[in-house]
Structure formats: C-alpha cells, structure tokens
Amino acid sequence: MTDIPDNIFGGYETWPPEKITKEEIDLIRDIKVVFETTKGTLKIRLFPDRAPLHTANCVKLVQDGFYDGLIFHRVIPGFMSQGGDPDGTGEGGPGYDIPAEIGVEHEAGAMAGARLGDAVNPERRSSGSQFYFCHDDTGCKHLDGQYSVYGKIVDGLDINRSLAVTYDASGPIQGVESDVIKKATLEIE
C-alpha cells in the first residue's frame, strides 16, 4: 500500500490547471474520498479517467480541509443530496469553476458537479466545490449529458438517502437542521 502525498496538487501555480498528469491520474485511481457525516460514513470512488480535473479538484479540496464542517444545504428525497458550499446557500464556492467533463451517466450514488444553469453557463462549467449525490438510478436520469459525473458512492448509499430533507416541492423547508460533513479524508486502496 502506498501513502498519499500530503499535498498532491501543491506544485501548480494556478488552480485549476488546464490538465493533470498521467501519474496524478494513476494515483487518484487508487484513492477513495471519505466523508464522515452527522449520519454516518460515505466512501466515494473517483473516476479520474473520465473526469480528471473534477477528481483532482475534489482530492485537492479534501486535502485542503475545504469540506470539513460544510452542510448538505439541498436534499430532495428521491432526487439528490447537494453540498460543498462554504456559504450553505447554494451560491458559494472557492472562487473558480471547473470545465465540463460530461459523459458518465447518473445512477444511484453518482457524484456530480453542481453548476449554474445553461442561460448563464452555456459551457456547463461545474462549481469549484459544490457537488451532488444521486439517491437512486432514476431520479437524476434527466441530468445525463448535462452535468459532469466524477465519482460514485461505493459505501454509504443508505447514509446519502438518510440525510435531512431540506427541500420539498415548494422550496426550502424552514427549521430543518442540515446534516454536516464533519471531516473529509482520503484513503488509498
């Protein structure tokens, strides 16, 4: 088993880079992202061969401690759980976005980059930090070909589905305490 370097992507002058190296892709292929939440543990396998910039960015944010303490601000039953916004409003991020890497279909546990709509974001660039997890195989199917899927929950799909519901058909539900990513870490296979 190889150790994960402390700062895999510390050598780049600007972030995000235009591309990452084959060696970095090879390393990410063996990494799982682990979110310790208030409901339990989610383990996510990343897809660096299909979405190298999204997966590199996710790993970098985890290593930077960016996700620690952030809430799942938008959870809609039968659809998805969204998090990764430092403001907790659905409008925050790290100050950059990620070029679209569309191609993987949505299924139960899929992790994809949240983004602004086509009217203001015709290139379909993803938020620099916001993501969502699909609840089942059908609820996110209408998003295929429009969002960058870059990982999948491989352990804890039930935890994803049990996160506090914060939205219903009329919008945000007042008074609901959102679940939290207590700590995000990386593990290597």
Image: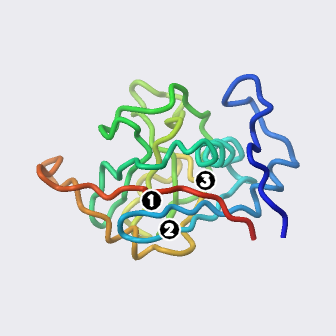
- Above-or-below relation of 87 to 40: above
Callouts 3 and 1 close, C-beta under 8 Å? no
Q: Where is residue 47 in the image (x, y as percent from the top left)?
A: 68, 57
Residue at image location 88% in from the left, 49% down from the top: 23
Callouts 2 and 1 close, C-beta under 8 Å? yes
Q: How far apart are marks 2 and 1 (CA)?
A: 10 Å
Q: Which amino acid does label 1 sit on?
A: Phe
Q: Which amino acid does label 3 sit on?
A: Tyr
Rate crowding at label 3 as few (under 14), some (14 to 19) or many (20 or more) other CA atoms within 10 Å. many
Q: Where is residue 176 in the image (x, y as percent from the top left)?
A: 17, 55
Q: In this view, does 35 lie to the left or right of 103?
A: left
- Camera-side residue: 165 or 140? 165
Viewer-nearest of discs 2 and 1: 2
Rate crowding at label 1 as few (under 14), some (14 to 19) or many (20 or more) other CA atoms within 10 Å. many
Q: Position of residue 98 (x, y in %)?
A: 59, 34
Q: Distance between the residues labelled 3 and 2?
A: 15 Å
Q: Mark 1 points at which residue?
A: 133
Q: Position of residue 145 (x, y in %)?
A: 53, 49
Q: Mark 3 points at which residue?
A: 150
Rate crowding at label 2 as few (under 14), some (14 to 19) or many (20 or more) other CA atoms within 10 Å. many
Mark 2 / mark 1, whichever is N-terminal:
2
